[in-house]
């Protein structure tokens, strides 16, 4: 028949009418919609096997797919209105579900491909990185064979990658500092003078000043020419300083003898074990000795018959 154009189901480029004045796609005929359906199915299979964005088979592809979905919905509604939910209506409903599933799978796979391409392209930007990753960097996308909305998505992903690289200091993480001189090695023996802190020096000075200074006791100077004759001569001239003088007894009495809590006793019996005073001093008692003991100890020894009072 003349005037009927048959299209092969294996055709990849779908011929569509020219755009309208406002840039929208005109109403497609049923035959054109069938071609869009086949192109959608073929593109979904191809994109599923590819990690890079596959070129669209026609301009305004997603507008054409939208007309296909609207056409299938209208047919299903008309069938249900006129015939009810018959087998034909169920078949049309299943066909509509298949088309929508293909749209979801194709969209997911294409967005993944655009995202991967945008990330790789933005991470490999310098000439050195391009040469080092010649087999990794993807080819440039020809945007006249893709939908404008996909280009907007691709550009947005690129901006997000740039923002991420800025926040993590991407260039600083990958740049090498081989040209900059290495710092000199630190000596393990001598500490640099820059490490001395004035505060620590002041603390050391304060600690040293807080320690009381110990002075050696002044030794009594003895005249090497002073002999026994000189000592006897001094005793004869100054009898009051002689230990055998009259006033020597009272002056020679140690301070503790004049303590009212101390008593002078005469030891009558020997004691094998020494006695310990309140100050921790040990006293060995021997018969005939005169001792100055605390009143409690003296009274005890007198009561026991070991000593007798010898007060002056």
Image (tube, rainbow, N blue to C red):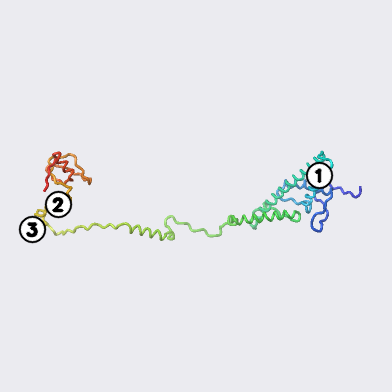
Q: Nearer the viewer, mark 1 or mark 2?
A: 1
Sequence order check, earlier mark of 1 and 3: 1
- Check the image and report above or below for 12 versus 215: above
Nearer the observer, 128 or 201: 201
* Residue drawn at the location 84% of the way across and 42% of the way down: 82
- Check the image and report above or below for 198 versus 114: below
Left or right of 121: which side holds 303? Answer: left
Percent position of residue 156, x then y: 68, 55
Determine the secondary structure under disc 1: helix
Residue 174 placement: quadrant: bottom right
Q: Is residue 174 visible?
A: no
Left or right of 58: which side holds 139? Answer: left
Q: Which mark is residue 236?
A: 3
Sequence order check, earlier mark of 1 and 2: 1
For label 2, the residue is 253
Q: Which mark is residue 249?
A: none
Percent position of residue 136, x then y: 67, 51
Which class describes the residues within 10 Å of circle 2: few (<14), some (14-19), or many (20+)?
A: few
- Check the image and report above or below for 230 versus 307: below
Q: Which mark is residue 77?
A: 1
Percent position of residue 32, x then y: 83, 49
Q: Are marks 1 and 3 in contact (CB under 8 Å)?
A: no
């Amino acid at each position: 028949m003349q005037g009927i154009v048959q299209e092969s189901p294996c055709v990849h480029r779908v011929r569509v009418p020219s755009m309208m004045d406002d840039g929208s796609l005109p109403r497609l005929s049923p035959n054109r919609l069938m071609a869009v359906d086949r192109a959608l199915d073929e593109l979904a299979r191809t994109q599923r096997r590819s990690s890079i964005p596959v070129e669209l088979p026609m301009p305004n592809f997603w507008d054409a797919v939208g007309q296909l979905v609207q056409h299938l919905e209208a047919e299903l509604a008309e069938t249900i209105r006129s015939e009810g939910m018959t087998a034909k209506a169920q078949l049309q409903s299943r066909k509509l579900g298949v088309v929508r599933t293909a749209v979801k799978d194709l969209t997911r796979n294409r967005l993944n491909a655009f995202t991967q391409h945008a990330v790789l392209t933005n991470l490999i930007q310098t000439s050195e990185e391009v040469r080092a990753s010649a087999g990794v960097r993807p080819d440039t996308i020809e945007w006249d064979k893709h939908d404008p909305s996909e280009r907007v998505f691709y550009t947005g992903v690129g901006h997000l990658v740039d923002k991420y690289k800025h926040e993590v200091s991407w260039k600083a993480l990958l740049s090498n500092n081989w040209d900059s001189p290495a710092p000199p090695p630190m000596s393990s023996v001598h500490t640099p003078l820059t490490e001395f802190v004035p505060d620590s020096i002041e603390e050391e000075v304060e600690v040293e000043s807080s320690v009381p200074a110990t002075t050696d006791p002044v030794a009594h100077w003895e005249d090497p020419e002073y002999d026994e004759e000189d000592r006897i001569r001094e005793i004869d001239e100054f009898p009051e300083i002689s230990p055998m003088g009259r006033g020597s007894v009272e002056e020679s009495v140690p301070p503790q003898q004049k303590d009212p809590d101390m008593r002078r006793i005469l030891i009558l019996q020997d004691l094998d074990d020494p006695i310990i005073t309140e100050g921790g001093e040990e006293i060995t008692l021997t018969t005939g000795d005169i001792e100055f003991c605390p009143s409690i100890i003296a009274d005890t020894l007198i009561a026991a018959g070991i000593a007798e009072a010898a007060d002056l």
